Each structure stands twice: as C-alpha cells, then as structure tokens.
Image (cartoon, rainbow, N blue to C red):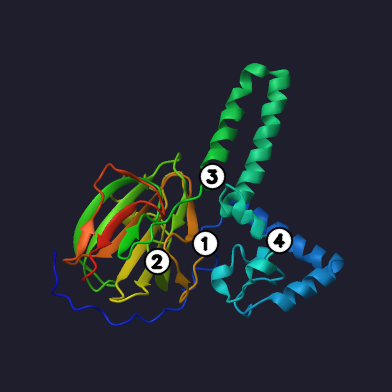
Amino acid sequence: MSTTDAPPARATVEPLPENLSSVQPGGGVCYRIELAWGRWRRWWLKRFRAGYVRRMAEARRGDTDGAPHEILDPRDLKYCRNLCRCDWDEADDPFRWRERLPFARWGLAELQLMGWSLLGLTVFLAYYFWYLAPVPGVILCLTVYFFRDPPRKVPQEPGLMVAPADGKICEVTQLEHDEFVGGPVVRIGIFLSIFNVHINRAPCLARVIALRYLPGEFLNALNPQSALRNESTWIGLEEESPPHRRLVVRQISGTIARRIVCNLRPGELVARGHKFGMIKLGSRTELILPDTEDLRIEVEPGRHVKAGSTVLARYEIAN
C-alpha cells in the first residue's frame, strides 16, 4: 500500500449535473404512473384541502427552487428531493409512518401496482383454475420479498467502512490511481442477486461532494465489463472527520435491474448506515476507498455482507 500521495485538500461541492433530473433518472413505467398520480393528488389537495396545503407551506423549511413541480408536502419530494433544498421536520411530516414499514419506501409504488394485480390474479385462478394459482402466487411472494427493508444495527466504532449494499463480495482489487480520491485505491465490488435486500446505505459519516449519472448498457452484474459499460450512479463522498478521506460509492444496474434510485443532495451530510437509495432487482454496488498503510480490508471474495452492518474495511486510529 502506498503513502506517497499527499492527502487531498477539502473537496469543493459540485453542483448536480443536468442529466440528474430525478432521484430515479432511468425512469420506468411505475415511475411515470406515480408521477401522474402526484399531479392528480396535488390538484385534489389544492381544491379540497386548502387548509392542509397552507399548514404544510408554513411548516416547510428551505425553498423549492429547482423542483420540477409544486411541492405541497413531503410526499412531493419522493422523486425530486435531490433537485431542491426544502424539507419538513419529522414532527410535521404526515408520511413519516412509512419509514416504519418493513418495505423500501422507493418500491412502494411497484409493490402496490404489482402486488395487488398478482394477488387478484392468484385469487381468480385459485377459484377457477386452482392448479395455475401457484404461479402468480410465487411471483407475488418474491415481489414482496424483494422490496423488504429490514432494520440494521450500524456499528459505531471510529474508522469503520460498512457495506453500502447487501450481497456477495465479487471483487477486491487494488487500483493505481483514482482521480476523485487523489491516489491509489481499493475497489470492493458487491453483487446483489434478486434475493438480496436492495437498499443502499452510506459507508461512513460523510459529506456528499458530487453525483454523476452515466447512462449505459444492462450487462449481467457478474460480468466484469458491467462496471464499465452499465448504467450507473457515481457518488463522491468525503469523510466529515479528519483526515477527511475521499471515497466513492457506485450503484450499477444489471441485466434485470434497470432502475437506480439515489436521493442524495450535493453538500448534505449523511450518517453511517443512512439509507440513500436502492437498485431495483439484481445489480452491483462498489465501494472505492483510499489505499493507505492504515487501511485493513475485512472481507474477501465470496463473503456475503449486509448493508449498514457488515464492516468491509477499517482505518486504524492512531493512539
């Protein structure tokens, strides 16, 4: 491991690139349906619940500049949180209860649209063609299982880098140089099958410096070329505590997974284990860390890890 590269100066936060026009830039059918529902919902609130709209406006913090539509309440931020700077306190958020559901909040639309349809088809077939009912029934169970969001215990020891995703370690590779990090790095790749939890979590307490969305192909995530050619979201982070290391998380699509969600804002501070997005269906997530003498890698290829709780690496803390 090298120590020849001097630590970089504190990073300057970069503005959001133009092609990141949503927290789910790849779009999708369910995404478009939910946006259409949002337009109808905002019309209904303004027409029939003017008092609620007024209270939400009074409780809102920050401005809505940059949002692609009106922001009447926290529900309207779901797909455009990264484009504006407004928020509500938890006590003023009428949708906060959804965080307690055991399902990914970014997958609730898919769960509703697919789940109820599959349930109806299962009941219909069970009544008329019972021998066919297990087919949609199994798909329904897999859909519910895929969008699960179990609680995680996040370790608090200083210097730890936790997994940004569930899955199996498919790569631990040393690279000579990374432009953002400013020196040699270790890239840790995690493959997510359709059976893994697909929520992404922050590896450490860090500030979001830059975000980049790269359209691309949808190769199998086990293919090494997928890291170079597939659609991805690149997230540049900087540790909040000295020595302010820079690191990168990459969300990479797969053959089936084609919807990447990342709701981070440039400049915001995220805690270790913070949920910031997901990749819908099988995919790959990478963590790129500065390769210094005090770095200790805690995993090897083939090991299964859990986002927010499994320690991938640690930086030794000087006494």
Under mark 1, the amino acid is Pro
Q: Are marks 1 and 4 in contact (CB under 8 Å)?
A: no
Under mark 3, the amino acid is Arg
The disc, 1 or 2, on the residue closer to the chain's N-terminal end is 1
User: Residue farthest to the front?
Assistant: 319
The disc, 2 or 3, on the residue closer to the chain's N-terminal end is 3
Residue at the location (61% across, 47% down)?
110
Q: Nearer the viewer, mark 4 or mark 2?
A: 2
The disc, 3 or 4, on the residue closer to the chain's N-terminal end is 4
Say if 251 sits above or below 130 in the image. below
Task: Using a 10 Å C-alpha cutoff, classify the residue at mark 4 as few (fewer than 14 neighbours), some (14 to 19) or many (20 or more).
Answer: some
Q: How many marks?
A: 4
Residue 222: image location, x then y, percent? 32, 44
Q: Mark 1 = which residue? A: 25
Q: State the separation of the CA atoms marked 4 and 2.
A: 28 Å
Q: Mark 3 = which residue? A: 148
Q: Mark 4 = which residue? A: 38
Task: Using a 10 Å C-alpha cutoff, classify the residue at mark 3 as few (fewer than 14 neighbours), some (14 to 19) or many (20 or more).
Answer: some
Task: Using a 10 Å C-alpha cutoff, classify the residue at mark 2 as few (fewer than 14 neighbours), some (14 to 19) or many (20 or more).
Answer: many
Q: Mark 2 = which residue? A: 235
Q: State the separation of the CA atoms marked 1 and 3.
A: 22 Å
Residue at the location (23% across, 52% down)?
172
Under mark 2, the amino acid is Ile
